[in-house]
Structures are given as C-alpha cells and as structure tokens.
Image: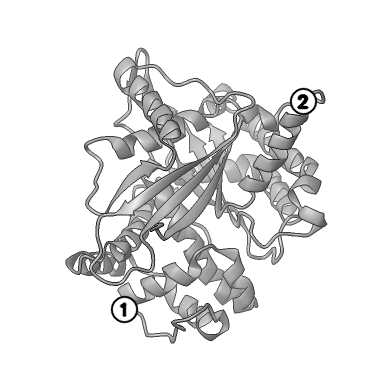
C-alpha cells in the first residue's frame, strides 16, 4: 500500500559556486550520521542513486576533507527526501513528510542558454516551472563574495539580485502557462547567507541589516518583479525572512562537517513557516478562505493536527472534504503567534501519546523559535 506522504517543496537559488551542492550534500549526510536524532522520524532519499551520490559527497568532506564538485551545467534535479515517522498510536492523517528540494546549475542565472541545444532550453523551462511550484524559496548570498567585496558589498548584491530578477522576467512567458498569474508559487523568499562560517561575527540580525543597508532598493525591485507572477500579491514575503547557512566549517586542509549552521532549520522552515505566514495574512488582509487554502500545500492536514495538539479552541472541521470557508480562517486566527512554551508542551504531550506526527510538527515550530534565539533565523511579519 502506498504511503500517504505530504510534500513540502523548496527552491534554492544561487549562482555557480554559492554552495548549493555542498549544502544539499551536507543536509542529507547529517541525517544519515549515527548522531542524528531518529526518535521521531528517519530520513531517506526516495532515489537510492541520488541518496548515494549525496552521501558520497558528504563522506568525501568528512573523511577526505574535499568538497564536492558543482552541479553540472546540464544537470537539474529534484531531490526527494522522505521523513518516515517512527510510529504513531492514533489514526494517521499522514504517514510521513516528503521534502522536495529543487536543484539546478547555478550558471543558468548568469549565462544564456545555447541556441544550438533545444534540450537545454526545454530543461530550463521545465526546471523553472518546477522551482516556481515550491512553498519556500531560498536566495543564497555567497559569504565568500561578501568577503571579496568587503566595504563594497552593494556591488555584489546589486549584480546578484539584478541577474536573478532579469532571468525570472526573461522566463516569464515560460513560467506562466497561457500568461496566467499563479496561485501556486513561492510565497516566502528567504535570504540565506551561505558559507556563514566565513563570517563568525555576523549573526542573522547583522546580516539582515547589511542587506537592508546595501540592497534595500534591489530587494524591493525583485519583489515588484515577483508580483508579476502571482495572484493575491499581498500574500508575498520577500526581504523579511533571513537565515544563516553553513554546510561545515572549512579550514585549510580540513572540513569540519559537524560544525554546521542552520541546516537543522530547513525542514522546520519548509513545513511551518508557510502555515505561520498564512495565519498572519489571514489576519491582515481581506483574503477569502478559498484563496488562502490555495497558497499553502497541505494546510488541510497540518493545521487541524496543530489545532488539536496545541489544545486551541475547537473549530468545526469537516471530516469529509475540505470545506475551507467553514473553518480555515477561524483556525488561522488562533494559530499565530504560538509561544515556544506552548509548542514545547505540545511536543511533550504528543510524545507521551506516541503521536509522532503531531510531535514532529510541534518540534518544528519549537525549532524555529530556538533558531531565532540562536540568532541564526529571523522571521518577518511577527
């Protein structure tokens, strides 16, 4: 019998050399390490071939102190990581979660496609359409480039964001089918400092301040471009959420893969941040429940489960079908904000009941709060 898995899609955008391949290899490798906590779920790659390739990259860093090669120019892939819940005592709304991580060659944002290769053109169109079906998008700001442009960071940031914006606009006719704006589109765009280990004195607030000081206008221009792709464009967050990411601590002749930054927050960000943001949009804007339900995948599974585990006031949720108008907005109005202490108690209660699905969602919410306390994550619109 096929498992009932709930997909969360992320798109990670970055130039060639910005660390995308190292990031995904380190993310998967850490989940396969014996030190990884498997009390709630285990992680596996849906494709054995992909999983072995990523794990080999990780072991190469761990054992040989050698980073992996960049993604080949023609190699765009969607990596699927399945979180198999350890067990569950009560009836299941889902058997596990699946994180779909969309990867692509970084030079696609800086180099024109070959006019002699129609397969590459088709691959780019297909990949960009897949990327734009994600729930959350990360825009990588290369920590090494920030060092290279020290005191002139605006030159690098302007070029980075302009290339990204221009490539999106150039692909607009390919991404928008029949020219129609999209309901399903990344609504949360997180600026991520990759290679954060190169900036030990830069916490997430200082990173955010640097971006605002040096690139506020460029971030706003990118936001305006993104609005050309989406329906309900007020339900769009860009320049509000920031994260520090480091796949390992890189030293001369040594790679310390255990000294990671922020990789433990990727799953919580992909799963919980869209729900939190949906709740805020429901409060702030006049958006119908029917439209809100289209903006975030799996809201009909995750939100009722969280309502139950957080012991919020019962909202009548239909047992058959998703009649969103009847319950979604009242539920969202209670959901945000949720205190860390409440999430901690919900996590402990779910564990006691061996309800590992609920415990995983509560833990993800708690992880986001702890990421903020560590100054690795900054959530906007709080």
- Left or right: 219 as drawn, with respect to 202: right
Looking at this view, name the residue that lies furthest to the front: 1
Which of the marked residues, 2 or 1, is nearer the chain's N terminus? 2
Q: Nearer the viewer, mark 2 or mark 1?
A: 2
- Can residue 336 be seen here? The reply is no
Residue 92 appearing in the image = yes
On the image, the x and y values in percent for residue 180 come to 78, 59
Residue on which the image places disc 1:
311
| Colour scheme | one colour
Figure quadrant of residue 164 = top right
Whole-percent x, y for residue 23 in the image: 45, 33
Residue displayed at 43% across by 51% down: 98
Query: Furthest-left residue in view?
Result: 352
Above or below, 102 against 379 in this view is above
Front-lying residue, 210 or 363: 363
What residue is at 68 percent from the left and 39 percent from the top?
A: 161
Q: Which residue is mark 2?
A: 117
């Amino acid at each position: 019998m096929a498992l009932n898995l709930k997909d969360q899609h992320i798109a990670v955008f970055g130039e060639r050399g910005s660390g995308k391949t190292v990031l995904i290899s380190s993310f998967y490798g850490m989940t396969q390490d014996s030190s990884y906590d498997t009390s709630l779920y285990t992680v596996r790659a849906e494709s054995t071939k992909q999983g072995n390739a990523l794990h080999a990259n990780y072991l190469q860093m761990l054992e040989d102190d050698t980073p992996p090669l960049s993604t080949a120019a023609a190699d765009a892939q969607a990596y699927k990581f399945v979180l198999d819940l350890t067990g569950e005592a009560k009836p299941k709304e889902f058997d596990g979660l699946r994180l779909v991580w969309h990867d692509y060659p970084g030079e696609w944002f800086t180099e024109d496609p070959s006019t002699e290769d129609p397969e590459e053109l088709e691959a780019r169109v297909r990949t960009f359409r897949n990327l734009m079906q994600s729930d959350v998008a990360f825009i990588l700001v290369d920590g090494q480039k920030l060092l290279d442009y020290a005191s002139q960071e605006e030159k690098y940031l302007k070029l980075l964001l302009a290339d990204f914006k221009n490539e999106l606009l150039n692909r607009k006719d390919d991404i928008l089918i029949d020219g129609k704006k999209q309901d399903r589109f990344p609504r949360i765009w997180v600026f991520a400092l990759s290679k954060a280990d190169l900036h030990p004195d830069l916490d997430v607030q200082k990173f955010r301040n640097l971006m605002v000081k040096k690139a506020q206008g460029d971030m706003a221009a990118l936001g305006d471009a993104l609005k050309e792709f989406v329906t309900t464009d007020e339900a769009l967050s860009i320049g509000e959420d920031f994260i520090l990411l480091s796949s390992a601590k890189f030293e001369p002749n040594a790679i310390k893969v255990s000294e990671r930054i922020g990789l433990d927050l990727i799953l919580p960000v992909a799963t919980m941040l869209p729900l939190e943001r949906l709740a805020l949009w429901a409060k702030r804007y006049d958006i119908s429940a029917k439209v809100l339900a289209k903006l975030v995948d799996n809201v009909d599974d995750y939100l009722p489960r969280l309502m139950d585990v957080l012991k919020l006031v019962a909202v009548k949720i239909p047992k058959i079908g998703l009649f969103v108008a009847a319950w979604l907005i009242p539920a969202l109005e209670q959901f945000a904000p949720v205190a860390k202490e409440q999430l901690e108690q919900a996590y402990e209660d779910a564990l006691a009941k061996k309800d590992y699905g609920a415990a995983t969602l509560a833990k993800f919410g708690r992880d986001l709060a702890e990421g903020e306390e560590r100054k690795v994550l900054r959530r906007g619109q709080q």
